[in-house]
Amino acid sequence: MFNLLRRNFKSIVGAILLSCTLWLLVKTENRYTYIITVPIRITRLPEGKTIANRIPSKVSLEVEGKGRALLALHFYDFGFNLDLPDVNTERKIELDKYLNFLDIPKTFDITIKNILEPKYFNLKVEDLVKVSRKIQFAGSITPADGYVLIMHHFSQDSVVLVGARSLIKTLLYVQTESLQVSGQKNNFQSTLQLIEPDPGLITMEPKQVNASFDIQRLVERIVYDIPVRIVNYPDNLMVEAIPPFLALRIKGGEKIVAGISAKDIQVQIDYARNFRADKEEYSALITTPNFISWTESIPQTFKLKVKKK
C-alpha cells in the first residue's frame, strides 16, 4: 500500500490541488455577507483650515459580494476618503450620506448593506496656525556632592507647532522626555525626544533636541568693597550708608565664582520704604548674578547718615 502511494504521489497531490481549486472557484462565485473595517481619512478641507478634534480612525461596515471580491478587499487599500472643502466650522458627519466617498472599485461588485459603528461623528474645523514655543526640560539632574548644576543649553530653544488655533493657543511650552541623572561630576550631553502635545492633530518640528549640561565644582569666595546704594530718598536730602561698603561670601560653580567682581553685585537700601526716625539699623537688599547665591554679609546691617542739601 505504501509503495503504491509513493509511486502515485504526484498524481494524488495534483488531484487534491485540482479539487481544492475547483471547490474554491465555486465557493468564491457565491455571494456572502461580511463585516469589514476600513479607515476614515479626511483628504481635503478648505484652504487654511484643519481638524481641531479627534475623530474615529475606522468604521465597521456590513457588505455583500462574491467571495473572490471579498477576499480581494484584504489586498486593496481603501476607506472613507472624505473630501470636505465646504466644512468651515463644525459639522455632524453622517457616514451613510458619504457612501460615494468609499473608494471600492466598481468592478468588485460589492454592496454596502449597513454602516455599523460609528454611524456618525462630529468634525470640528478651525484656522490652521503656525507658532513657535519654548522647550522646557523635564527630569532631574543631581550632581555629586560638592558639585552644582549651573545650567543646561538646548541646540535650539524653541520648536515650530502647526495645528488648530484653539489647540495651540493653550500651549505655553513643549517638554522634553524625562531625564534622570545622579552623581554627575562632569559636563555631559544628551539627545532628548520632545513630547508631542497632541499627536495627529498638531505637528511639531523638530521632534528631538540636543541638550548640554554644565556641571561645576561648588566653591565659596568673599567679594570685598561692594558699594551700598541708597535709593528713593527725597531730592532735598543727602543719604549715605555707614559703612558705605560690604563684603559678601558668595557660593556657586567655580568658573562663575572666579569671574565675579564687586560691580556684578547690587546692594541697595530703599529709603522711602524703610526709613524711620526711631530706627538705627537697616538691612540691605542684595542681588547676585544668576547661578550665584550668598551665605554671609559683612556687616549684616547699616546705619543711615542723613543731611539736608
Image: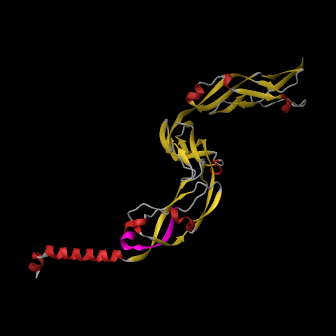
On screen, 11 above or below 77?
Answer: below
Between 150 and 165, which is closer to the camera in this rendering?
A: 165
Between 208 and 21, which is closer to the camera in this rendering?
A: 21
**In percent of the image, x 18 and y 73: which residue is there?**
14
Q: Quadrant of residue 232?
A: top right
Residue 242 painted magenta: no
Between 53 and 307, which is closer to the camera in this rendering?
A: 53
On screen, 202 above or below 63?
Answer: above
Residue 258 horizontal/vertical position (percent): 58, 25
Q: Quadrant of the N terminus?
A: bottom left
In the picture as drawn, the residue positioned furthest to the bottom comes out as 1
**In percent of the image, x 88 and y 21: which residue is there?**
237
Residue 16 horizontal/vertical position (percent): 21, 76
Read off the magenta span: 57-70
Q: Quadrant of residue 88?
A: bottom right
**In percent of the image, x 54 and y 43: which residue is there?**
141
Q: Quadrant of the C terminus?
A: top right
Residue 58 painted magenta: yes
From the image, give the main secondary structure of the stretch colored magenta.
strand
Residue 12 horizontal/vertical position (percent): 16, 76
**In percent of the image, x 54 and y 46: which residue is there?**
204
In the picture as drawn, the residue positioned furthest to the top comes out as 309
